[in-house]
């Protein structure tokens, strides 16, 4: 019998198949009405394009429909629970989108005379003030474009400070539980990377750490709370040891949302830390950016921060773009213009909306939600490390042992239940990791439904229904995709179908 | 607090389930000395009305290019954004999704990235493009590192026509990985011979088209010289609209194209966020940094898209990765893709023609002002004029008249006295004849 759900079009109700833009329209069509260019002489210097580019032409209704249909094939925070550990998928307030588009904010050019952008510079300064106050750090480099970019700035600042004191060092210590960006960053800043194992409590193995710490170590890159969702309770000792060894303490601030308003990294001995504005401060993830990764710095590192930066002068705000005009020793420039201004607007809008009291509630509720999941699920799913956890809780695949169901299969089954899966197979320090970060913007009812679903799926796995999991997801616009084929035979762009010469 | 859904009753019940009395108990791993007893000394929460008012106050202290005749360029350009672009990118399904790690529920983002990659490849005349970088300057720096890996050489020739921020960012990145820059002096007169700077250690030559001063080049001779010496040619594009009229970098012989796509789909936003583009030849894809969307099929045999070749990337290769980039410019890439789809071949070509024609009209007008000399023999929508006084002073004076009259070259090349009289002016489809009149009048005034 044929599949009763099969349709002639391949569409399924609201899920409509959508071809590529290159498979639609015709070259002469356009969705914009531009005036006829005035007739002028050609001053292109003889470098004019001769052939067509090959872009498709569509009308406005076709374009709107194309992207609307594509959008409906995405899961998003606006849809539902998105507990992607370490990524902090919290609600993105729409007020901030409005603010970023206000005339006089969204439409400023970065190279206007600074006298004409005093409001923009004041806004950057205000955002910087909030970030410094919340972290207890005296300085901040605002220009990094994302978290990993902020990591680069942090390590470059550290290297510049070390070189300035004639103390070239070669190694950076990175716990095995770290984000992949940490070792990649250390390498890109010219350092050799050395791993530190986790202990059986999911924290840095202090003995291994002390053994590796010597006068050749430039920095430790430590995420705190760490990627197991735990607070490094030896952090003050770690910081002291790092400083005694003449090294710097780089904190990966990806998880600042767990402690914001309650604990200031500056009080933990941190020398520098990037802040993912798209995590803690709710700027939208946008399907993979744009992010923003300001880096807060200690007194010792502040002089080496990159240009540009905003200072308050006698005649208003000034933008220091030229290292020669700087009183300090900036190590260089790491981004065009002045950083992700549009993200500063959104983050500041969020911080002002929440206030110091609200931000304290943010970390409280984020940690409460994660511990609630821990408590509700600990008898069902294998807890990787004993709690309390911070803003996220780490499980491993122990509970699926001998069921034949893998972490990946389990994650795919959650998709059919209307949840975005948690982060899977990260961190690398446990087997089949499931890192669940609920965030503070979820209701208790959502968490309860998630708990019931996790329990029901676990029961199903233990009952031996392996095929159900291996076939999941079934209800999505596409089912499991062949990633091996994609990598073996990369098709990274559309190409026009080959013309059959014989038929011409 | 409008973004927090838990009630006090919820919190109490949840604490009971956990088996603690207070949220503070959950923070017991934090050293006592580091726990703040009180909120940080910052203002308390505010409603939308108050927050919006504060931002309107920030806005009121700026002179917006939308409300004044503006001829600013220098790597960021004001273009008209169709209303459809901003509407579509604000759909929650695009705006509030993360990197498409679960492809079954991310086909919207993945297909749009695949389309973006194709559009960038077509515009640049290259075979493949990645799913975006942070911005043009960092894309340029990554292109140079990529060339050094491909050629296993450590010297980089940087043209004096490359945008100064791109030069500085590339120099900064290079210094930390031990690459040596051979940076040629600012090429404001034109006529630089970058080929003469190539040696046996040179991994690549980096040029820009149109260059920072606005000149248009046919770099095919330089491409041949690079290839003869075993080096790559990196072509930077800061004004992507120019690709509607000019020979593509691929046609000229570029091996890697780095640029900024801000002009298509993205607001000025004080220079960020924008969208970095990076394109190359197929044989170099294993050295290409950043995300790549690729086509495949699902278990039912239907076409679909995934992130692919991730063995290049930090989350798999850690310290052996091609770059540490993770988040890129997803939503800006989407805006680029939507705007370019709206334009299509016909609209995009016309937009480029319109930009060029406006700039030609502007140049013709400025040449009639006594003491003003247009230095470019060729340009697309931006060119350099020499004034009989400091360009920075002239710009300040024009701003007081409510005209944003261009970018003084000294803003980006400070401390070089011969560059002080140089003013970079750009015209786009947004400039009216009245704007050009206003600039001419303001400039005359500033020169008196």
Image (cartoon, coloured by chain):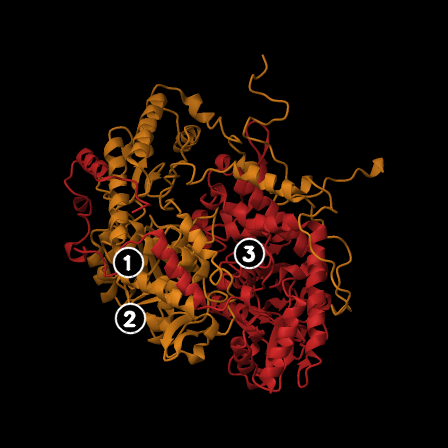
Say above or below: A436 vs B132. Answer: above
Q: Chain of mark 1?
A: A
Q: Quadrant of residue A157?
A: bottom left
Number of numbered labels in the structure image: 3
Q: Are marks 2 and 3 in contact (CB under 8 Å)?
A: no
Q: Tell which residue pokes out farthest to the top in this image.
A: A1
Say above or below: B53 vs A416. Answer: below
B363 vs B394, left or right, is right
- Label 1 vs label 3, nearer the camera: 3
| Residue occupied by mark 3 | B266
Residue ID at (52%, 36%):
A72
Let me know if marks 1 and 3 both belong to one chain. Answer: no
Q: Nearer the viewer, residue B96 or A299?
A: B96
Residues under labels 1 and 3: Cα distance? 47 Å
Residues under labels 2 and 3: Cα distance? 37 Å
| Residue occupied by mark 1 | A212
Q: Position of residue A73 (x, y in %)?
A: 52, 36
| Residue occupied by mark 2 | A299
Q: Position of residue B261 (x, y in %)?
A: 58, 58
Say above or below: B93 vs A13. Answer: below
Q: Quadrant of residue B240?
A: bottom right
Query: Quick one: SS at disc 3?
Result: loop
User: Which class describes the residues within 10 Å of circle 1: few (<14), some (14-19), or many (20+)?
Assistant: some
Say above or below: B188 vs A340. Answer: below
Q: Chain of mark 3?
A: B
Task: From the rendered image, report the letter of the chain displayed in orange.
Answer: A
Q: Nearer the viewer, residue A158 or A149?
A: A149
Residues under labels 2 and 1: Cα distance? 26 Å
Task: From the rendered image, report the letter of the chain displayed in red.
Answer: B
- Label 2 vs label 3, nearer the camera: 3
Query: Quick one: SS at disc 2?
Result: loop
């Amino acid at each position: 019998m044929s599949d009763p759900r099969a349709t002639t079009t391949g569409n399924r109700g609201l899920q409509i198949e959508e071809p590529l833009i290159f498979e639609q329209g015709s070259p002469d069509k356009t969705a914009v009405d531009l005036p006829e260019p005035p007739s002028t002489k050609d001053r292109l210097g003889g470098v004019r394009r001769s052939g067509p580019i090959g872009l498709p032409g569509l009308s406005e209704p076709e374009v709107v429909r194309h992207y609307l249909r594509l959008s409906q094939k995405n899961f998003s925070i606006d849809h539902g629970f998105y507990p992607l550990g370490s990524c902090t998928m919290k609600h993105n307030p729409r007020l901030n989108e409005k603010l970023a588009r206000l005339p006089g904010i969204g439409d400023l050019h970065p190279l206007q005379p600074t006298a004409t952008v005093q409001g923009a510079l004041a806004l950057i300064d205000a955002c910087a003030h909030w970030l410094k106050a919340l972290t207890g750090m005296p300085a901040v480099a605002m220009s990094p474009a994302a978290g990993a970019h902020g990591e680069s700035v942090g390590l470059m600042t550290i290297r510049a400070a070390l070189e300035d004191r004639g103390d070239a060092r070669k190694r950076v210590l990175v716990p095995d539980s770290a984000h992949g960006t940490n070792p990649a960053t250390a390498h890109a800043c010219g350092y050799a990377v050395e791993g530190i194992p986790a202990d059986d409590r999911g924290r840095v193995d202090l003995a291994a750490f002390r053994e590796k710490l010597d006068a050749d170590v430039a920095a430790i890159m430590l995420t705190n709370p760490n990627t197991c969702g735990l607070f490094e309770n030896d952090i003050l000792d770690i910081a002291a040891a790092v400083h005694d060894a003449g090294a710097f303490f780089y904190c990966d601030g990806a998880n600042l949302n767990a402690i914001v308003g309650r604990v200031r990294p500056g009080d933990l001995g941190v020398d520098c830390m990037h802040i993912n504005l798209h995590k803690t401060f709710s700027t939208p993830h946008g399907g993979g950016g744009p992010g923003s990764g300001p880096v807060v710095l200690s007194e010792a590192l502040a002089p080496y921060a990159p240009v540009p930066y905003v200072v308050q002068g006698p005649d208003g705000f000034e933008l220091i773009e030229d290292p020669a005009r700087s009183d300090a020793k900036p190590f260089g420039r790491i981004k065009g213009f002045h950083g992700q201004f549009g993200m500063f607007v959104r983050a500041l809008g969020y911080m002002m909306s929440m206030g110091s009291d609200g931000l304290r509630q943010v970390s409280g509720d984020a940690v409460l939600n994660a511990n609630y999941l821990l408590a509700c699920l600990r008898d069902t799913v294998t807890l990787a490390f004993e709690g309390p956890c911070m803003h996220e809780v780490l499980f491993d695949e122990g509970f699926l042992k001998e069921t034949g169901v893998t972490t990946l299969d389990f994650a795919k089954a959650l998709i059919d239940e209307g949840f975005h899966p948690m982060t899977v197979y990260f961190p690398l320090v446990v087997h089949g990791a499931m890192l669940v970060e609920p965030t503070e913007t979820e209701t208790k009812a959502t968490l309860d439904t998630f708990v019931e679903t996790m329990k029901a799926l676990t029961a199903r796995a233990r009952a031996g229904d392996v095929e159900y999991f291996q076939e999941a997801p079934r209800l999505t616009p596409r089912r499991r995709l062949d990633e091996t084929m994609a990598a073996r035979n990369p098709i990274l762009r559309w190409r026009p179908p080959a013309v059959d010469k014989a038929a011409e | 607090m409008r973004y927090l859904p838990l009630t006090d009753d919820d919190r109490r019940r949840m604490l009971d389930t956990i088996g603690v009395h207070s949220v503070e108990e959950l923070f017991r791993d934090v050293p006592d000395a580091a726990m703040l007893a009180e909120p940080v000394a910052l203002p308390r929460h505010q409603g939308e009305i108050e927050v919006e008012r504060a931002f309107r106050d920030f806005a009121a202290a700026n002179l917006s290019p939308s409300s004044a005749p503006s001829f600013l360029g220098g790597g960021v350009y004001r273009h008209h954004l169709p209303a459809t672009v901003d509407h579509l990118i604000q759909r929650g399904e695009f705006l509030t999704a993360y990197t498409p790690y679960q492809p079954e529920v991310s086909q919207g983002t993945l297909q749009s990235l695949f389309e973006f990659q194709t559009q960038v490849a077509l515009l640049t005349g290259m075979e493949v493009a990645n799913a975006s970088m942070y911005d043009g300057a960092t894309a340029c720096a990554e292109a140079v590192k990529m060339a050094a890996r491909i050629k296993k050489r450590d010297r980089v020739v940087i043209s004096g026509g490359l945008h100064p921020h791109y030069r500085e960012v590339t120099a900064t990145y290079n210094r930390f990985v031990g690459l040596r820059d051979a940076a040629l002096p600012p090429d404001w007169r034109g006529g630089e011979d970058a080929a003469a700077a190539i040696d046996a250690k040179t991994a690549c030559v980096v040029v820009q088209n149109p260059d920072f001063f606005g000149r248009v080049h046919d770099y095919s001779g330089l491409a041949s010289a690079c290839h003869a010496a075993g080096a790559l040619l990196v072509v930077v594009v800061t004004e992507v609209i120019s690709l509607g009229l000019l020979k593509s970098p691929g046609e000229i012989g570029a091996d890697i194209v780095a640029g900024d796509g801000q002009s298509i789909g993205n607001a000025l936003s004080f220079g960020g966020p924008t969208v970095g583009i990076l394109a190359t030849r197929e044989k170099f894809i294993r050295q290409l940094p950043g995300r790549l969307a690729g086509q495949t099929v699902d278990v039912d045999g239907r076409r679909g898209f995934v992130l692919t070749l991730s063995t290049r990337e930090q989350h798999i290769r850690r310290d052996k990765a091609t770059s540490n980039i993770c988040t890129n410019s997803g939503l800006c890439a989407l805006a680029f893709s939507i705007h370019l789809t709206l334009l299509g071949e016909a609209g995009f070509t016309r937009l480029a023609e319109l930009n060029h024609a406006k700039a030609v009209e502007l140049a013709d007008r400025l040449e009639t002002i006594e003491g003003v000399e247009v230095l470019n023999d060729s340009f697309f929508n931006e060119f350099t004029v020499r004034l009989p006084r400091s360009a920075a002073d002239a710009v300040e004076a024009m701003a007081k008249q409510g005209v944003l009259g261009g970018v003084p070259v000294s803003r980006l090349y400070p401390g070089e006295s011969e560059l002080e009289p140089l003013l970079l002016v750009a015209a786009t489809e947004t400039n009216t004849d009245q704007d050009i009149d206003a600039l001419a009048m303001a400039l005359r005034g500033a020169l008196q």
